[in-house]
């Protein structure tokens, strides 16, 4: 069973009655406790009408039953958002109950199958797609789909100890939309929870990954490519106020830890090197050139090794030298063209050209 985070605690300010959030002392990674991500979302500014020193009681006053977020409509429940992701085949979700209390969800698992980009949804992002099963509302827009990736996680049990095991699917190529990077920033793992093998594998991945040419951060690419998993949990906390007579804002804080049952050897440095051999398009430029050179060298060695006599060997060597010379000449020509283009860009005429060139107001 997944270990759960401890319930949020508060300390009382000696100068007033409003509670202050207790300072967090991050647990050590060796015990596989939750690590605070230092990521938070402001949910609600407290008002006298629903204030309570216990944040769960405060939200129970402010939100409809079962809600842990401000509803845009009472029909858009967390179940609505879960159905969006499941019905669109974006995720697979399972909920696990306490054997002693079948009404209590102790933890849930969510496997990420795909994340729809706007172009995958249709030409009109505001036009609703109908669910494949009867439900009220009967469908959802793309913006509901985007919201679902956040609001589906806002489930909490009565013991305030619910957690999510999040993981990717093996042998799957993901095309993440840009908004998903913000999702990853809040819900994704952090290096502090990585076991030693994964730390080494991720270090190797960063050395080879061409992050300069990719909009996908290295950690997201690493986790999604090797189908890694982690555990996510959240807790309510009040923001500390400067004045004791002010009501605090309510925040949602993110916690993560490693899932110890995962076979870390699947993402070790050797597996990373093998992955880049199969996906050279993601290599850094220098590594890509090295990879091409070593591959060419291997082919040439095999070609020369096939020579059956000194005469054939001499002929093959001559062909190899001619080929290398032609490649060198082509490379030099390309460098000259690049240099010429750079000189054109440095021309003072282009540098001082009016931004509004070609516009006529008559």
Image (cartoon, grey):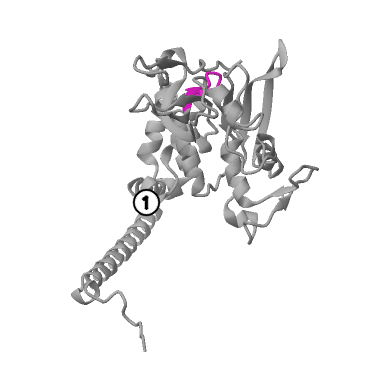
The location of residue 200, given as percent across then percent down, is: 39, 27
**Residue 249 in magenta stretch:** no
Residue 294 shown left or right of residue 143 in the figure = left
Residue 261 in the magenta stretch? The answer is yes
Q: Where is residue 168 in the image (x, y as percent from the top left)?
A: 57, 35
Compared with 37, 339 (above or below) is below
Q: Which residue is drawn at 35% across and 14% down?
A: 14
- Residue visible at 42% across and 24% down in the picture: 36
Q: Nearest the camera: 215 or 47?
A: 47
Quadrant assignment for the C terminus: bottom left
**Residue farthest to the top?**
100
Residue 31 sits in quarter? top left
Q: State the extent of the magenta-drawn residues as a range.
A: 254-264
Which is nearer the eye, 101 or 170?
101
Q: Can residue 308 be seen from the camera position used here?
A: no
* Residue 103 position in % (x across, y down): 72, 18
Query: Position of 222 compared to 78: left or right?
Result: left
Looking at the rendering, in which quadrant would you find the N terminus?
A: top right
For label 1, the residue is 310
Dot 1 falls on a residue whose secondary structure is helix
Residue furthest out toward the right: 134
Q: Which of 63 and 32 is in front in this view?
A: 63
Q: Which residue is drawn at 47% across and 42% down?
A: 182
Residue occupying the far left of the picture:
348
Report if residue 88 is visible in the image: yes
């Amino acid at each position: 069973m997944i270990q759960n985070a401890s319930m949020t605690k508060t300390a009382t300010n000696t100068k007033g009655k409003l509670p202050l959030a207790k300072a967090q002392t991050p647990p050590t990674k060796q015990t596989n406790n939750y690590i605070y991500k230092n990521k938070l979302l402001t949910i609600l500014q407290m008002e006298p009408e629903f204030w309570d020193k216990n944040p769960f009681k405060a939200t129970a006053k402010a939100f409809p039953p079962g809600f842990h977020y401000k509803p845009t409509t009472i029909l858009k429940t967390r179940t609505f958002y879960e159905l969006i992701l499941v019905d669109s085949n974006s995720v697979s979700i399972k909920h696990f109950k306490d054997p002693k209390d079948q009404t209590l969800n102790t933890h849930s698992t969510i496997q990420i199958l795909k994340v729809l980009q706007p172009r995958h949804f249709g030409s009109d992002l505001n036009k609703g797609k109908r669910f494949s099963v009867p439900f009220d509302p009967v469908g959802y827009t793309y913006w509901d789909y985007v919201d679902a990736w956040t609001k589906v996680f806002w489930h909490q049990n009565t013991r305030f100890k619910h957690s999510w095991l999040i993981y990717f699917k093996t042998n799957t190529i993901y095309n993440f939309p840009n908004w998903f990077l913000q999702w990853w920033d809040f819900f994704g793992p952090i290096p502090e929870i990585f076991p030693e093998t994964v730390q080494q594998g991720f270090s190797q991945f960063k050395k080879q990954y061409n992050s300069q040419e990719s909009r996908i951060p290295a950690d997201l690419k690493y986790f999604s490519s090797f189908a890694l998993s982690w555990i996510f949990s959240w807790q309510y906390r009040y923001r500390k106020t400067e004045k004791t007579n002010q009501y605090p804002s309510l925040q949602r804080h993110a916690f993560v830890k490693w899932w110890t049952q995962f076979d870390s050897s699947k993402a070790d440095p050797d597996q990373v090197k093998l992955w880049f051999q199969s996906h050279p398009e993601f290599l850094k430029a220098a590594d890509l050139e090295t990879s091409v050179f070593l591959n060419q060298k291997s082919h040439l060695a095999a070609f020369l090794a096939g020579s059956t006599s000194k005469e054939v060997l001499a002929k093959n060597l001559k062909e190899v030298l001619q080929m290398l010379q032609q490649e060198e000449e082509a490379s030099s020509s390309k460098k000259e063209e690049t240099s010429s283009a750079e000189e054109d860009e440095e021309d003072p005429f282009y540098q001082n050209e009016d931004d509004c060139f070609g516009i006529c107001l008559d």
